[in-house]
């Protein structure tokens, strides 16, 4: 009996804590931004030909023919709701990633498809423009940046090569910088 | 040997909650039982006549896929429930073939009632997209509207009709 | 990131199996393998269903909310069942009828079957038949089955309140129910039979 009173109070305390949890954290479940996929992760998945990713290009056909991400399927936004195209959204166990030049189209497509109750939908963060900027022309991290950023850069350079077939020129520069990175690492290790 | 007492319901509920939470954390979805039964039925029907399942709008959703309908985690979960229940029964000395019923009814009545109840539950859980554990319990835990509607609907109907079935239980 | 394993991984099957064992064990230990104990909730002589059910729901809910708050889990990454308002309500009503007549639900019947309850075996067979009837008569049920799809909506959005307020009310209601059940059970078991 006494035990239950204690437990009741404890549970009640939890209830109060939950009631006053700040809102911005609870709100995010429904906002489309939360569904945006991480750009680097996606690039990695594409390079590794991850079969769990299904890319849908929402731009017009002409643009799609000029440049597109590998393995993507072209469905212009206005044709998204055609029966044949809706079949593409029925991908069990696959992540469907929408992309266009910016994010307007892809966000629209995401919203429409989500309303229609399709699952596992994602939007390419920043669209192709951002993709080109970060993956195809990555910025070299600052000298004092931490290892994570260097790794990221390495990866992006690799990705860039994969997508454009270029990057030979950059290679030399990268190798040289790599030495600095290693030295830095040693210093840190010694310090520990 | 005497049967052991049942666990404190709140403790059991708390542990069940932790199990369900780990199910969400590890596999991304909660608990469920009726899904496994649906898939067993579908694979049986598919075995007997694949043509029939391919033509049916309902069956074909499960059979016209690369993966076998039984290759689903809910099926494994229910096999686990079977084993877990058996272990618990063995630990608490409750393993015994019997028909449990109110003294006011015969075993035969109880069996008939159980089969009717089972059929209703089979149909109801398919229409409602999940049973008490899948739709109501896991649904409530994730705060989905469906979970609450399901819970209110199941228990509401139960309470409404309880009066008419009183003699079957007490 | 949570969930750790995707549904198509082989390891997920193993994990699900282990979770199932734990689930079945707890159900049986709580007494869910007895149909008369389960049905007791409708007559006020045994509230084990309500107690276990709500304690479990609240534990998981709090766990999910806190994991979400600390950024380990995103509600969009876990399975939330879609709300088909009519299908859920009608299906629930049929299940409610099945519950009061049969005295089990699918999970508990499997558990009771495991310890040798013959009525549970019949009940499970009934579920298979029921699912088969649904499959065969799908065109009849189809309208109600697919109508009124509101998507993956959450209860507090439906009610138009914040998540915190809802969780708080739910815990409060559960606590009131727990204490209420305590007093009702005390009263009824004093007045009526010991089964």
Image (cartoon, coloured by chain):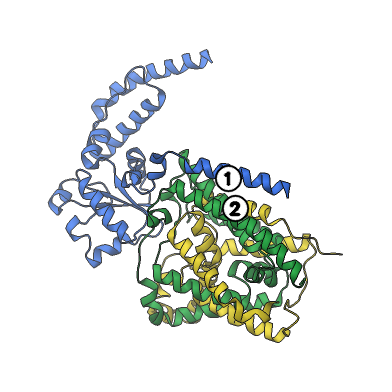
Q: Are marks 2 and 1 in contact (CB under 8 Å)?
A: yes
Chain whose colour in the figure is blue: A
Instruction: For mark 1, give the secondary structure.
Output: helix
Q: Nearer the viewer, residue A159 or B78?
A: B78
User: In the figure, residue A83 lies in which quadrant?
Assistant: bottom left
Residue to which mark 1 is pinned:
A12
- The image shows residue B53, relative to residue B145, as above or below, that is below
Look at chain C in the picture and name its colour.
Answer: green
Residue B163 percent coordinates (x, y): 61, 78
Which chain is indicated by disc 2?
A: C
Res A146 visible: yes
Write down the colour of chain B. yellow
**CA separation in Å, label 2 and label 1:** 8 Å
Residue C125 shows in the view:
no
Q: Is A187 situated above or below C54?
A: above
Residue labelled with disc 2: C175
């Amino acid at each position: 009996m006494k035990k239950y009173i204690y437990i009741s109070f404890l549970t009640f305390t939890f209830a109060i804590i939950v009631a006053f949890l700040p809102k911005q954290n609870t709100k995010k479940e429904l906002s489309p931004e939360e569904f945006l996929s991480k750009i680097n992760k996606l690039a990695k998945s594409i390079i590794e030909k991850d079969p769990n990713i299904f890319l849908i290009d929402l731009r017009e056909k002409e643009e799609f023919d000029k440049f597109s991400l590998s393995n993507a399927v072209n469905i212009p936004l206005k044709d998204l709701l055609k029966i044949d195209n809706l079949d593409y959204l029925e991908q069990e166990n696959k992540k469907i990633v929408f992309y266009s030049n910016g994010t307007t189209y892809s966000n629209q497509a995401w919203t429409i498809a989500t309303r229609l109750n399709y699952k596992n939908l994602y939007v390419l963060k920043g669209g192709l423009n951002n993709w080109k900027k970060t993956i195809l022309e990555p910025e070299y991290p600052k000298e004092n940046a931490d290892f994570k950023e260097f790794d990221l850069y390495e990866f992006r350079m690799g990705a860039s090569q994969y997508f454009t077939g270029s990057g030979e020129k950059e290679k030399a520069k990268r190798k040289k910088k790599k030495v600095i990175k290693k030295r830095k690492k040693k210093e840190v290790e010694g310090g520990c | 040997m005497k049967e052991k007492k049942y666990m404190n319901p709140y403790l059991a509920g708390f542990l069940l909650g932790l199990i369900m939470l780990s199910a969400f954390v590890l596999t991304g979805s909660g608990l469920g039982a009726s899904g496994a039964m649906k898939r067993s039925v579908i694979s049986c029907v598919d075995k007997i006549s694949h043509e029939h399942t391919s033509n049916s709008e309902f069956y074909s959703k499960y059979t016209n896929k690369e993966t076998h309908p039984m290759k689903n985690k809910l099926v494994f979960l229910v096999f686990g429930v079977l084993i877990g229940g058996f272990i618990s029964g063995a630990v608490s000395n409750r393993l015994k073939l019997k028909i449990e019923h109110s003294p006011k009814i015969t075993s035969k009545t109880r069996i008939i009632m159980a089969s009717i109840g089972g059929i209703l539950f089979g149909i109801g859980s398919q229409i409602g997209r999940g049973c008490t554990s899948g739709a109501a319990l896991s649904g409530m835990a994730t705060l989905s509207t469906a979970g609450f509607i399901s819970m209110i609907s199941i228990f509401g109907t139960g309470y409404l009709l309880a009066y008419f079935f009183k003699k079957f239980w007490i | 990131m949570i969930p750790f394993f995707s549904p198509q991984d082989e390891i997920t099957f193993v994990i699900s199996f282990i979770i199932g064992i734990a689930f079945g064990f707890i159900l049986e230990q709580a007494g869910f393998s007895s149909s008369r104990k389960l049905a007791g909730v409708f007559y006020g002589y045994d509230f084990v269903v309500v107690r276990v059910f709500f304690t479990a729901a609240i534990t998981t809910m709090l766990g999910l909310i806190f994991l979400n708050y600390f950024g380990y889990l995103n509600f969009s990454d876990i399975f939330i069942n879609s709300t088909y308002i009519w299908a859920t309500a009608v299906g629930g009503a049929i299940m409610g009828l099945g519950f009061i007549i049969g005295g089990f639900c699918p999970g508990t019947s499997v558990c009771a079957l495991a310890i040798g309850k013959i009525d549970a075996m019949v009940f499970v067979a009934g579920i298979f038949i029921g699912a088969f009837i649904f499959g065969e008569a799908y065109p009849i049920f189809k309208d109600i089955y697919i109508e009124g799809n509101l998507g993956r909506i959450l209860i507090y959005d439906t009610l138009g309140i914040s998540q915190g307020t809802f969780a708080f009310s739910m815990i409060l209601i559960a606590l009131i129910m727990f204490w209420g059940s305590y007093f009702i059970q005390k009263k009824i078991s004093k007045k009526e039979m010991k089964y």
